Image: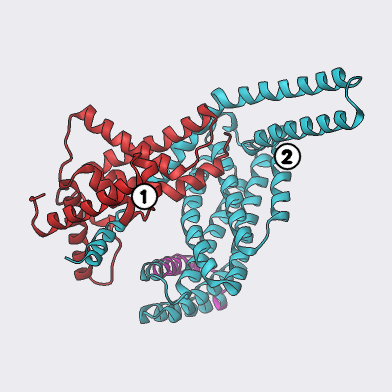
Chain colours: A red, B cyan
């Protein structure tokens, strides 16, 4: 498979935000999220250039790679996912809203959900991110995690339940 | 907590975005890596394939001339030539000014522009072509091979960039009249790419020393800013659009006012100087009122002030 710089740029523009966000929600630092995200795209480039094989679903490929790299990251560092620190989500990353009150509410919601996602099973967190945040369809999610569509539907419902429990009574799930 | 409320909370995570500077930096690094990898493995391989293709073609013609019936021989030749063309076309897509393949690249781009249907697709294509020029320019400015940047090689690239940006803007304007929704989608893309163009052009500007080239680069940066403003205007004009873009446009207009105020002080013609000052004052007043309509009017005044400055 041959692709031009423009084609790569298009793929990069289409996916950079989501892949970064996925990595950011999985690891505990912005720098690590940036490193993993750039590695995802680097692997994509090398894969395309070396294998000369068509990637049927670029998005699924990128998420799969991101997921594997996050696993490697924790293996390498022998780290477990940590809850987000107070100052981990820096305020410049959220847009300036009309009023400081609105911004504060939004900031607090982001922190709350991010921390809750860290406390539930990692497979559940992945499913929630893919389905409700990135709006992937179930067949596409199945392509990423290799599980059947039925299994993913059941797991998704459990994932929502787990997240709800975590948000209502933090630390219980 | 209801499912809907829960999903709404999950959706707040959409606000987590990478830093714009890092996105640009990462993109640039990846492009460099792509070029390195292409130079190391991909081009020689293609060259070998190309040479093999030519050899196969010659062999086929020589060997099959007596065995194949004429129609099959012609078909074989056409297919082989087509494949050879494909290989050359692939080469051309990453070619840089000065190389043999660059003219092929430009020809293929012109053909694509001629063939592309619809304003929306034309906007996308012009954006992509502008991006190509920025990448080429940046590569030439940063690469040791082009350290002594030759104005004759660089200027046509910058001129073509300007043409692509102007064409993007013109097509976006047309599209906004015909299909507002599609125009907003394209305008969002333009706001992203113009930011990248500007950073890249500024990098090239810092490296290039030739005064004519620097002047043309300055113009190219101004064109980029205009295209960004046009895109923001299209988004802000759509009543159902996000406040975020309206705020962004307000900031851009304000920046433009400040920069024009500085330039206007040094204008020689006092008449023009007064007119510009008046326009900028009115624009500032409109800007403080807060409505989108006033914001668009302020933008028009600022653009008119900009035109007056240029005529001085």
Instruction: Residue at 31%, 38% (x, y): give it.
Output: A67
Q: Position of residue A125 (x, y in %)?
A: 24, 48
The residue depicted at 23 percent of the width and 47 percent of the height is: A124
CA distance separating discs 2 and 1: 36 Å
Q: Position of residue B263 (x, y in %)?
A: 49, 65
Residue B120 found in image quarter: bottom right
Residue B183 horizontal/vertical position (percent) = 54, 67
* Pointer 2 local density, CA inside 10 Å: few below 14, some 14–19, many at least 20: some
Q: Which residue is mark 1?
A: A18
Residue under numbered circle 2: B104
What quarter of the picture does the C terminus of chain B occupy?
Answer: bottom right
The main secondary structure of the magenta stretch is: helix
Left or right of B149? Residue B181 is: left
- Magenta segment, which residues? B249-271
State the SS at label 2: helix
- Chain where mark 2 sits: B
When asked about the image quadrant of residue A122, the answer is top left
The kind of secondary structure element at disc 1 is helix
């Amino acid at each position: 498979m041959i692709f031009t710089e423009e084609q790569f740029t298009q793929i990069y523009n289409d996916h950079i935000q989501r892949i970064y966000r996925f990595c950011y929600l999985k690891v505990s630092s912005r720098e690590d999220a940036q490193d993993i995200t750039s590695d995802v795209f680097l692997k994509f480039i090398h894969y395309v250039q070396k294998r000369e094989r068509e990637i049927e679903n670029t998005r699924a490929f990128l998420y799969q790679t991101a997921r594997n790299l996050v696993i490697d990251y924790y293996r390498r560092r022998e780290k477990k996912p940590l809850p987000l620190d107070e100052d981990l989500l820096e305020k410049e990353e959220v847009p300036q809203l009309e009023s400081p009150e609105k911004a504060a509410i939004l900031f607090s919601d982001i922190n709350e959900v991010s921390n809750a996602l860290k406390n539930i099973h990692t497979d559940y967190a992945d499913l929630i991110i893919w389905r409700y945040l990135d709006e992937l369809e179930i067949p596409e999610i199945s392509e990423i995690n290799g599980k059947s569509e039925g299994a993913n539907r059941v797991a998704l419902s459990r994932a929502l339940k787990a997240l709800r429990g975590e948000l209502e009574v933090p630390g219980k799930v | 907590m209801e499912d809907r409320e829960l999903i709404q909370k999950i959706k707040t995570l959409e606000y987590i975005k990478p830093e714009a500077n890092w996105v640009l930096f990462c993109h640039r690094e990846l492009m460099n890596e792509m070029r390195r990898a292409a130079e190391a493995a991909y081009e020689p391989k293609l060259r070998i394939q190309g040479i093999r293709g030519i050899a196969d073609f010659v062999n086929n013609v020589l060997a099959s001339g007596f065995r194949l019936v004429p129609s099959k021989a012609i078909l074989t030749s056409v297919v082989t030539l087509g494949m050879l063309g494909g290989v050359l076309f692939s080469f051309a897509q990453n070619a840089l000014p000065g190389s043999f393949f660059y003219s092929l690249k430009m020809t293929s781009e012109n053909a694509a522009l001629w063939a592309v249907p619809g304003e929306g697709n034309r906007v996308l294509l012009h954006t992509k072509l502008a991006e190509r020029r920025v990448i080429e320019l940046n590569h030439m400015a940063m690469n040791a091979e082009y350290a002594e940047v030759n104005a004759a090689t660089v200027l046509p690239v910058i001129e073509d960039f300007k043409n692509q940006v102007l064409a993007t803007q013109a097509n976006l304007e047309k599209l906004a009249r015909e299909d507002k929704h599609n125009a907003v989608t394209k305008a969002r893309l333009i706001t992203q790419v113009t930011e990248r163009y500007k950073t890249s052009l500024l990098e090239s500007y810092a490296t290039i020393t030739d005064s004519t080239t620097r002047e043309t680069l300055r113009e190219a940066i101004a064109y980029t800013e205009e295209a960004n403003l046009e895109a923001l205007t299209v988004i802000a004009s759509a009543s159902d659009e996000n406040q975020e873009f309206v705020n962004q446009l307000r900031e851009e207009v304000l920046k433009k006012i400040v920069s024009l105020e500085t330039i206007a002080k040094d204008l020689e013609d006092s008449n023009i100087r007064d007119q510009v000052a008046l326009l900028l004052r009115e624009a500032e007043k409109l800007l403080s009122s807060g409505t989108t309509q006033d914001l668009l009017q302020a933008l028009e005044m600022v653009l008119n002030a900009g035109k007056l400055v240029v005529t001085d």
